[in-house]
Image (spheres, rainbow, N blue to C red):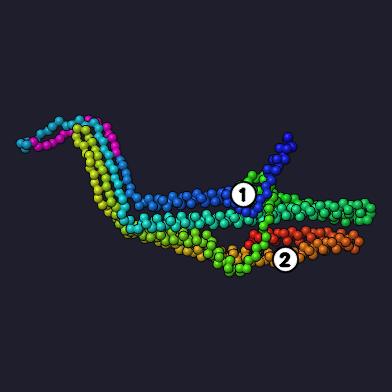
């Protein structure tokens, strides 16, 4: 039972995954995308807040007060013209309630431009999330390729280590029979040790790449991933570099997001400038009060028009407008910088793709040449026509050629 449980646990820790599944998992579990979603919710709430400024404002206030027995001397005139005093009322409490309502009618365009700015910012945040989504996909592709390269390195070095150990055993038998110098056997053993060290480095890189992939996909850190590379092959594309650059300018979400931020800043300039204008609002209210034995007020309704003007805005608004205009200039410059960076990024990746595809062709020939060279040198060594150093050099060249060919294919895929 313990053995069975152990096998089941190991089976659960291993997972075969393709590129599309990896991308889906990374999009689902990306903490950055979840953070971007929270930013979208914040921007949406800010837009609602800007729209709510068009709605009427209402306030209610009231109070109940207990009073002591005040000394009141009420002076009045009677019908005969003589003055006199009367017994003051005994006032011990007072109550009042007030309801005020105001509806903005004109704010110099401040509300309208505020809503417009909030709309542009919401669109920018949504596009930021889309741009981040593209980045998560690209990061997943690169992590997938790195895991593939790390796994390939482990496999090739392991195969080379097995060959090196087998060669060492054969050479050890020759040395025991006096057919090989001790120094040559030591060279072979040193070669095996070097391959063992290379395998340790390759296994360490594989473990790190596997852990990085698990974290990106939201899987358990100890999950062992086996990559399914079916369907991943060279994509034939006749477009030239300028075609890709123009497509980037048309489709890049970060470029459009920055453009919306610039529009939002321009609306902010108009909203700030609107502070120089007066504001107009409809007002209404209701008042009720009661002071027992003295007076009471009910049904006191008022309605009217209110106008307010902040005179200090004439000399305080100019600096605010200049700050808003400076932000517009900054965003315009940032847009120009982003255009340059996009052109540089696309051009660099395109040239890398062309270079890698050329390297693949060269490495493919190099692999055939290295294998044939190893076969020839091995035959010469068996016939005492080549030294052991020649054989070991041919073996290293064969490993390097195979490794370079595989890694170039992965790098070309990422660049595309």
Give the residues drawn in magenta, as a range: 62-78
Rendering coords of residue 115 (x, y %): 40, 55
From the image, tell me which residue sits under label 1. Answer: 217
Crowding at mark 2 (Cα within 10 Å: few <14, some 14-19, many 20+): few
Q: Which mark is residue 402?
A: none
- Residue 217 vs 264, above or below: the answer is above
Helix, strand, or loop for circle 1?
helix
State which tag comes first along the sequence, 2 or 1: 1
- Would you say residue 65 sits in the magenta stretch? yes
- Residue 415 vs 22, above or below: the answer is below
State how far apart marks 2 and 1 are (Cα). Answer: 34 Å
Rendering coords of residue 361 (x, y %): 72, 66
- Residue 230 vs 363, above or below: the answer is above
Q: Tell me what residue is drawn at x 67 percent, y 57 percent.
A: 231
Q: Residue furthest right?
A: 178
Q: Tell me what residue is drawn at x 93 percent, y 51 percent.
A: 176
User: In the depicted view, which residue is nearer to us: 183 or 258?
Assistant: 258
Left or right of 50? Residue 31 is right
Rendering coords of residue 281 (x, y %): 29, 52
Q: Which mark is residue 361?
A: 2
């Amino acid at each position: 039972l313990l053995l069975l449980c152990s096998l089941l646990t190991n089976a659960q820790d291993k997972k075969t995954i393709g590129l599309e599944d990896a991308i889906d998992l990374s999009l689902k579990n990306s903490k950055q995308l979840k953070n971007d979603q929270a930013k979208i919710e914040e921007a949406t709430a800010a837009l609602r807040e800007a729209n709510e400024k068009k709605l009427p404002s209402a306030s209610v206030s009231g109070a109940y007060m207990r009073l002591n027995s005040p000394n009141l001397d009420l002076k009045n005139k009677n019908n005969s013209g003589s003055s006199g005093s009367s017994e003051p009322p005994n006032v011990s409490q007072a109550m009042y309630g007030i309801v005020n309502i105001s509806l903005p009618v004109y704010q110099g365009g401040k509300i309208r431009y505020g809503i417009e700015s909030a709309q542009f910012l919401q669109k920018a945040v949504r596009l930021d999330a889309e741009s981040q989504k593209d980045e998560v996909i690209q990061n997943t592709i690169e992590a997938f390729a790195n895991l593939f390269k790390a796994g390939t390195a482990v496999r090739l070095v392991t195969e080379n280590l097995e060959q090196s150990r087998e060669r060492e055993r054969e050479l050890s038998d020759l040395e025991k029979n006096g057919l090989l110098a001790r120094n040559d056997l030591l060279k072979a053993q040193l070669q095996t040790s070097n391959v063992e060290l290379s395998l340790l480095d390759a296994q360490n890189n594989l473990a790190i790449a596997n852990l990085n992939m698990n974290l990106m996909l939201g899987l358990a850190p100890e999950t062992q991933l086996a990559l399914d590379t079916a369907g991943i092959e060279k994509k034939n594309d006749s477009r030239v570099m300028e075609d890709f650059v123009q497509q980037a300018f048309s489709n890049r979400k970060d470029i459009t997001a920055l453009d919306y931020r610039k529009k939002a800043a321009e609306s902010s300039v108009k909203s700030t400038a609107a502070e120089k204008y007066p504001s107009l609002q409809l007002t209404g209210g209701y008042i009720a009060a009661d002071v027992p034995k003295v007076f009471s007020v009910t049904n006191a309704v008022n309605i009217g028009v209110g106008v307010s003007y902040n005179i200090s805005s004439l000399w305080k608004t100019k600096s605010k407008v200049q700050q808003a205009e400076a932000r517009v200039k900054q965003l315009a410059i940032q847009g120009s910088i982003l255009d340059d960076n996009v052109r540089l990024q696309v051009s660099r990746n395109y040239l890398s793709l062309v270079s890698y595809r050329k390297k693949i062709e060269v490495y493919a020939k190099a692999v055939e040449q290295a294998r044939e060279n190893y076969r020839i040198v091995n035959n010469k060594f068996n016939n005492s026509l080549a030294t052991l150093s020649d054989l070991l050099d041919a073996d290293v060249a064969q490993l390097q050629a195979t490794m370079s060919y595989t890694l170039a294919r992965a790098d070309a895929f990422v660049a595309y």
